[in-house]
Image (cartoon, rainbow, N blue to C red):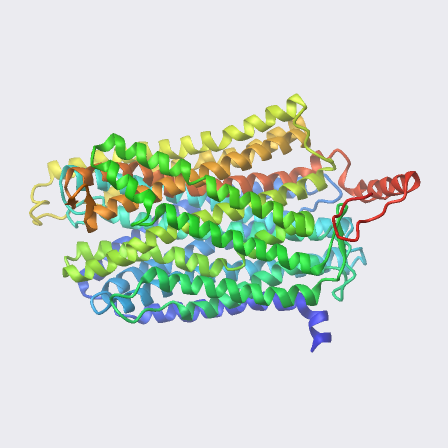
């Protein structure tokens, strides 16, 4: 058995992906078999599903043009440098297709699970949670399964073509070429993810803001009232932004994290039983194990009674997947890796790699806990915004901004500690494998995340169908937890993006042939400042797009209220399709410029000013983007739950305030401001910084100071020169420093 695994482990990895997809199909079939409610409920759900599909078709049409043009450019560039290959274009197209497919899988099941969750809520909270979470788990398992299957299968193909068939070294230029071609898969995934995230975010928030400002504030009707012309577009937006967009987002993050670790693993000389490729295989194996244990953990998410805590049930699933993955990682690391390895002068052992994985899992857990604290109802930050709502709209805005800014401190300290700790144990490979460990349970993280929009849609259908109050109370219970899980998911994603970007940055430095990024140089410092600016202009473009689309939506909703008599008396049906069309058109048009910035700026800076200035740019983008992502996502999440606090009844200075009170109206304003923060620009930051790093990694051979095919020779010459000058003694305590 041991001999079989040593020789065939590479082929086992895609099997993990197939297992995830098989369970996904089973869970999808189970959701589809559940009761979809009466004819009116099914009609409303059909409007939502049709609107979501219309958006995806329009988005795919535009992105297909982009994918073909980008593939042609990549194919041509692959002929210019010896270590590149035109095959990268094929890899790019596969990555783009699977990223779009991941988003579609999530959106498709979400538009089925929403109405079935509403119907389940007519019986019990436990059944409603089961349906909505199972729908979310279809999304999580589909994304992780496709990523492991796609990356594992492509690696088998390219490894055999470039290394096995040529008899090349696993640390040589041929393996570098194989991994660069594989980077095309990640580039395709991240490119589609960025457009899907930004476009979906613009769609959902334009509809949400329009529905809130006219429906709730001006007309005084509930958020999801069937009389509101924008309510269908709002519910469609939950699916295309928070489900399809998030699915493509985490698919790209998942792939980029594994790829970055594999690229750094190539630099490790490993005397193992896997032909020297154990450090390259390890991140894929950990991802596969995390997928399997996420499947197991889905069975722990359940409640029995109406009074049981939904958040506790979700935490049980999350914690169990993390613990099981950590235990399995120990045996995988000690079995695969040798006792001593070295990367860029840093010596470490297999146990050090396991400690780095634990650091990554710990960072991910702490990020979720901290984000939950800053965004959950009943906690100090949200309560402070609730209290400040009592004195008006302006103080609500001030309170939310302050909470968002404060919320960056603890996560950054945790992140800094994680980077320092993982590097201490295993150098740059430790930082990368820590990110891989954090992302290993992506299937469970995304299941918890996707459950929220499904519950939100379920509440909307309950309101539009005018179901009994206890049904809406159950869906509101799920939705309130879903707001928190969505915020923690975004915190988790931005933390993983920071670690992944550092690993990609290290890989870029190696391929580009530079030793360091010297900020004492004026041009590098200038690049650093320009990089720090990019997340701000990116956010500005995204938020402005939401504002413009929301203005058009507000005008359309007002027109319908004014020109269609009988809407408020339920005698006339609003023209839902016109609001859906406004969001679709605006999102497709407005997503192009922010996406172009991420793709084009690294190319311009790299070719015009060289790799070191580009390195400065990446450093600025990463630091600024991480902070902006945390600030915007947490502020938006806190504003949202402050508003929901009034819907349940908020106690301020001896008095309880409910819906339609003046403090509640102030909280609606804060939530409206926070909507594009938390669902458009904020979560786009993690894709922005990773995509710019991947683009830089792919163009690195073309702008390298030392041509990539000469890198190995240069390293040998440097080692000979250093050896002749002095004797190098490695610290036996694995400090990794030469004495």
In this orientation, does residue 632 appear? yes
User: Which quarter of the image is occupied by the N terminus?
Assistant: bottom right
User: Number of numbered discs present?
Assistant: 0
Q: Position of residue 209 (x, y in %)?
A: 27, 39
Q: Position of residue 197 (x, y in %)?
A: 43, 44
Q: Position of residue 66 (x, y in %)?
A: 51, 41
Q: Is 246 or 101 nearer to us in this picture? A: 246
Q: Is 293 or 383 nearer to us in this picture? A: 383
Q: Is residue 560 above or below residue 285?
A: above
Q: Is residue 487 left or right of residue 181?
A: left
Q: Position of residue 716 (x, y in %)?
A: 86, 44
Q: Is residue 562 left or right of residue 499?
A: left
Q: Is 433 or 281 nearer to us in this picture? A: 433
Q: Is residue 361 above or below residue 324?
A: above
Residue in the picture at 64% in, 33% down: 615
Residue in the picture at 16% in, 46% down: 656
Residue in the picture at 62% in, 65% down: 330
User: Which quarter of the image is occupied by the C terminus?
Assistant: top right
Residue found at the far front of this picture? 654
Residue found at the far right of this picture? 724
Q: Is residue 725 left or right of residue 705?
A: right
In this orientation, does residue 56 appear? no
Q: Is residue 353 above or below residue 196?
A: below
Which image quadrant is residue 479 in?
Answer: bottom left
Residue found at the far bottom of this picture? 1
Which image quadrant is residue 396 in?
Answer: top left
Q: Is residue 276 above or below residue 674?
A: below
Q: Is 485 or 274 nearer to us in this picture? A: 485
């Amino acid at each position: 058995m041991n001999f079989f695994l040593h020789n065939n482990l590479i082929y086992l990895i895609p099997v993990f992906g197939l297992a995830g997809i098989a369970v996904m199909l089973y869970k999808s079939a189970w959701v589809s078999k559940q009761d979809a409610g009466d004819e009116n409920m099914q009609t409303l759900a059909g409007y939502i599903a049709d609107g979501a599909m219309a958006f995806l078709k329009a988005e795919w049409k535009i992105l297909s043009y982009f994918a073909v043009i980008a593939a042609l450019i990549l194919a041509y560039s692959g002929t210019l440098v010896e270590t590149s290959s035109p095959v990268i274009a094929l890899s790019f197209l596969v990555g783009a297709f699977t990223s779009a497919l991941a988003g579609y899988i999530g959106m498709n099941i979400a538009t089925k699970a929403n109405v079935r969750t509403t119907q389940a809520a007519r019986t019990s909270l436990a059944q409603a949670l089961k349906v909505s979470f199972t729908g979310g788990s279809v999304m999580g398992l589909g994304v992780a399964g496709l990523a492991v299957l796609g990356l594992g299968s492509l690696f088998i193909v390219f490894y055999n073509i470039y290394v096995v068939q040529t008899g090349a070294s696993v640390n040589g230029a041929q393996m570098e070429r194989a991994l660069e071609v594989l980077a095309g898969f990640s580039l395709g995934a991240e490119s589609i993810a960025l457009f899907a995230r930004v476009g979906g975010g613009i769609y959902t928030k334009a509809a949400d803001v329009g529905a809130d400002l006219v429906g709730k504030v001006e007309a005084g009707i509930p958020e999801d009232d069937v009389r509101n012309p924008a309510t269908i577009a709002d519910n469609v937006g939950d699916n295309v932004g928070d489900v399809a967009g998030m699915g493509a987002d985490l698919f790209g993050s998942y792939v980029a994290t594994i790829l970055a670790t594999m690229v750094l693993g190539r630099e490790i000389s490993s005397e193992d039983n896997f032909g020297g490729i154990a450090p390259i295989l390890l991140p894929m194996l950990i991802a596969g194990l995390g997928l399997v244990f996420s499947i197991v953990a889905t069975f722990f998410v359940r409640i029995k009674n109406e009074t049981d805590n939904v958040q506790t049930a979700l935490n049980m699933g999350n914690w169990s997947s993390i613990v099981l993955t950590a235990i399995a990682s120990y045996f995988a690391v000690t079995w695969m890796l040798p006792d001593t390895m070295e990367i860029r002068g840093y010596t470490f052992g297999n146990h050090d790699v396991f400690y780095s994985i634990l650091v990554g899992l710990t960072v991910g857990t702490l990020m979720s806990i901290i984000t939950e604290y800053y965004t959950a109802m009943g906690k100090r930050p949200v309560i402070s915004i609730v209290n400040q709502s009592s004195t008006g709209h302006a103080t609500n805005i001030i309170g939310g901004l302050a909470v968002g800014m404060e919320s960056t401190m603890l996560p950054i300290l945790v992140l800094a500690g994680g980077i320092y700790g993982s590097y201490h144990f295993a150098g740059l490979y430790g930082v990368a494998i820590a990110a891989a460990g954090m992302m290993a349970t992506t299937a469970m993280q995304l299941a918890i995340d996707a459950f929220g929009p499904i519950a939100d849609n379920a509440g909307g259908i309950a309101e539009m169908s005018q179901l009994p109050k206890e049904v809406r109370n159950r869906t509101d219970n799920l939705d309130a937890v879903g707001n928190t899980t969505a915020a923690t998911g975004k915190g988790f994603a931005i933390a993983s993006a920071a670690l992944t970007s550092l690993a990609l940055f290290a890989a870029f430095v190696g391929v580009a042939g530079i030793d360091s990024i010297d900020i004492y140089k004026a041009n590098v410092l200038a690049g650093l400042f320009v990089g720090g600016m990019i997340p701000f202009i990116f956010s500005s473009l995204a938020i402005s797009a939401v504002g413009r689309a929301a203005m058009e939506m507000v005008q359309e909703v007002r027109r319908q209220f004014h020109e269609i008599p009988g809407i408020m008396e339920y005698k006339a049906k609003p023209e839902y399709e016109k609001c859906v069309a406004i969001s679709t058109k605006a999102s497709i048009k407005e997503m192009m410029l922010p996406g172009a910035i991420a793709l084009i700026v690294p190319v311009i800076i790299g070719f015009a000013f060289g790799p070191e200035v580009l390195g400065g740019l990446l450093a600025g983008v990463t630091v600024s983007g991480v902070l902006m992502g945390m600030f915007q996502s947490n502020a938006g999440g806190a504003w949202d739950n402050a508003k929901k606090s009034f819907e349940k009844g908020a106690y301020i200075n001896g008095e309880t305030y409910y819906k339609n009170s003046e403090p509640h109206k102030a909280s609606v304003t804060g939530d409206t401001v926070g909507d594009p923060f938390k669902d458009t620009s904020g979560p786009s930051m993690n894709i922005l910084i990773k995509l710019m790093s991947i683009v830089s990694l792919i163009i690195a051979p073309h702008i390298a100071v030392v041509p990539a095919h000469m890198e190995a020779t240069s390293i040998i010459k440097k080692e000979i020169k250093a050896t002749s000058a002095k004797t190098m003694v490695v610290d036996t305590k694995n400090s990794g420093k030469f004495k």
